[in-house]
Amino acid sequence: MIKYMTNELFSKAVNAKFIQITITRREKGETICFDPVKDLEYNGE
């Protein structure tokens, strides 16, 4: 697990992960509820 990412890289990772989750949850008909810290297991300070 990456412990630290620059803000730019983190933003890109969040955007990519958000798109992936959005598509998955739309297919399942679920409500979108996105927590980038939890979903990416981001442990930066």
Image (spheres, rainbow, N blue to C red):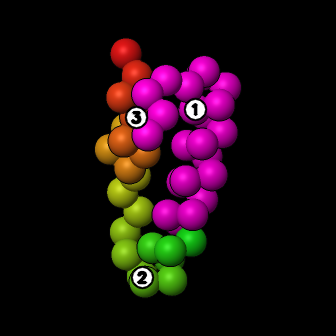
Give the image quarter of residue 29.
Answer: bottom left
The furthest residue to the bottom: 28
The furthest residue to the top: 45
Q: x%, y% of residue 11?
A: 61, 34
Q: x%, y% of residue 45?
A: 37, 16
| Residue that numbered label 1 is attached to | 10
Tag shown at residue 25 = none
Above or below residue 15? Residue 3 is above
Pointer 3: residues within 10 angstroms few (<14), some, or many (20+)? Answer: some
| Residue that numbered label 2 is attached to | 29
Residue nearest the observer in this picture, 14 or 44: 44
User: Pointer 1 and pointer 3: residues touching (CB < 8 Å)?
Assistant: yes
Q: Earlier in the sequence, mark 1 or mark 3?
A: 1
Is most of the magenta stretch helix, strand or loop?
A: helix
The residue at 60%/22% (across/down) is: 7
Tag shown at residue 42 = 3
Amino acid bearing label 1: Phe
The furthest residue to the left: 38
Q: Earlier in the sequence, mark 1 or mark 2?
A: 1
Give the image quarter of residue 43.
Answer: top left
Write down the region rendered in magenta.
1-22
The residue at 43%/45% (across/down) is: 40
